[in-house]
Amino acid sequence: MNNVILSVKNLEVTFKNGHESFTAVRDVSFDIYEGESFALVGESGSGKTTIGRTIIRINPATKGEITFAGKRISGVIDKALDSYVIRNIQMIFQDPMASLNERATIDYIVSEGLYNFNLFKDENERREKVFKALNDVGLLEEHAERYPHEFSGGQRQRICIARVLAMEPKFVIADEPISALDVSIRAQVLNLLRDLKQERGLSYLFIAHDLTVVRYFADRIAVIHQGELKELASTDELFARPLHPYTRSLLSAVPLPDPDVEKQKKLIVYDPGMHDYAKDKPTWREVFPGHFVQANEKEAAEYAAMYQ
Amino acid sequence: MPPIRELTDRRRTMNYDIATPILKVRDLVVKFRVRNKELTAIRKISLDLFDGETLAIVGESGSGKTVLTKTFTGMLESNGRIDAGSIEFEGRELVKIKSDRDWETIRGVKIATVFQDPMTSLNPLKKIGVQITEVIEKHQKLPKEEAYRIAVELMTKVGIKNAEKRFNDYPFQYSGGMRQRIVIAIALACKPKILICDEPTTALDVTIQAQILDLIRALQKDYGFTTIYITHDLGVVANVADRVAVMYAGQIIEYGTVREIFYDPRHPYTWALISSLPTLASRDEPLYAIPGTPPTLFNEIKGDAFAPRNRYALNIDFEEEPPFFPVSPTHFAKTWLLDPRAPFADPPLAVKLMRKKGNIYKEPAAEGSK
């Protein structure tokens, strides 16, 4: 197994608004290994984006600890470490229409990070880096002089990816990178992200609500519901033996492009009230090797029995 | 909310009647005037909609699927116009209707639309209940008390618990899924003959999406309306549709029953759509991506619009527009590959897998294939 590149331990994120407070993420722990794509899957409001934003230090962690390449990056950190984090953890956002500065050329957008960190010796080197990043995502050098509105949605998402690549990060957080794109364009962007992983050994945190996309892209998947992890397993394992009723409801809800299957399908509806946690409290348990689920003693036995 | 399991079990019992088209579109051409140039958004579409069926229209953004259905309710933007063709509904020629007053006897009453984003299709300053009753009062000319009764009944029907209590809530007090339920209730308030669902679940979570699709299906059974789904999600299509029309660059390029389109697609664009789905892909191979972009509709398109992106394109595809070739009495595709003179085209792997699953594809007669 590779080294752990990012580790999240007992993370809690609480938003305060006057006297009201809302805990968006509760006691979340996971490790991401070097060269791995790790997916966080959940509905809107489940806290998956908050976790991503906490890792890149947009939201502060209320409790718990995040370490990146062995260094603690949550809480108060010094300036050198802060710029190390910014350089090495980059984020791709959901909507390429909203995440590019409409008044800047592609050349500037891609090199903004390079300017901020003085990552080039001279103008020639900067241009080279920009061109290389554009080439890597399948755009042309001539595109550098254009403005975002001259590009289609798929091309814009490539520009966002080029901007990330120019920084040569170790770790990329992709927050629903293809949700806003057309079906025929999705494949292009997914392929690109995959190739980059293979070529450069990038590690990903892939945030999504669509399990079918994740099945194709991720090595391991964590399912999150209302701020708590419910299940974590390798992709094949999770699809072969989903344990938690919430995971099973998610799997049943995804419409498959197969009419005969789809028209026979029974929806599973998850009701959080179904758990009897009054006496027997749930904990994070390893039911099968590498396959974790939130369950109490009784449930864990039932889950294990499902696939005997 | 109604018990979902029960709804799912009742699925697919309804049949539609091929003999009686409720809506007939013939050779429809829609043009838009954009910055002194003319754009042809719909290029000669003919389509029958059968009473009681669910038709799904699939295509990428810009293919014209929304524009097509907007012509049914007279909701084209002011720079757009119907250039040619006819739309016949209940013996009336919709293309000839000009005044908004005339449209009001159809739009919302006979043909209603559920839009993509429930966040923007409700008035944030008005109570939920009032937004339903005002439709009933306006179109059915019923007194207030009667409208209230119907509104509460509708809210219960679409799965709002404590409808009477929630009648006085405002949209911000509702979640996205609940709001879409209200939008559906408003659309159904006048008991329309046709319900157009324009990406009704794209803005919603998967679990909520599944519930809304089930809800529409159950209501269709109750109220007996005909449904048109506009979507780019082939999973949703497989779930809801009886028949499917695939659109590309302002034209329908293939249509057939849902099984025919998924298990025996014939147009290379339909092949490409199916091959690019991550669900069907093996994890060790790159996904099939359609190269290039759709053509601009400002210029006249010569030949098959998909030809420049099509790896199965024949020479004639760049010269002459293909006609519709019949595959079965219900299945037609607009591709020269179906011409008897065309060479054999070996479809992508994903399509072959689907053929196997569906078991309706017949190998062509042995003579030419060897």
Image: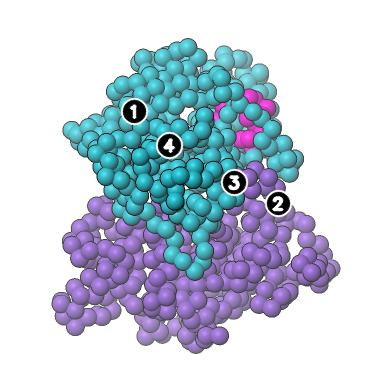
* Residue B279 in the image, given as x and y percentages of width and height: 54, 57
* Residue A53 in the image, given as x and y percentages of width and height: 47, 68
> Looking at the rendering, in which quadrant would you find the N terminus of chain A?
bottom right
Chain of residue at mark 3: B
Q: Which residue is mark 4?
A: B333
Q: Which residue is mark 3?
A: B358
Residue B1's image quarter? top right
Cα–Cα span, label 3 and label 4: 18 Å
Question: Which chain's colour is cyan?
Answer: B
Q: Residue at x 40, y 48 (%)?
A: B344
Badge 1: few (under 14), some or many (20 or more) residues near its Cα, within 10 Å? some
Q: Above or below — where is B56 with respect to A43?
A: above
Cα–Cα span, label 2 and label 4: 37 Å
- Position of B57 compared to B15: left or right? left
Q: Nearer the viewer, mark 1 or mark 4?
A: 4
Q: Earlier in the sequence, mark 3 or mark 4?
A: 4
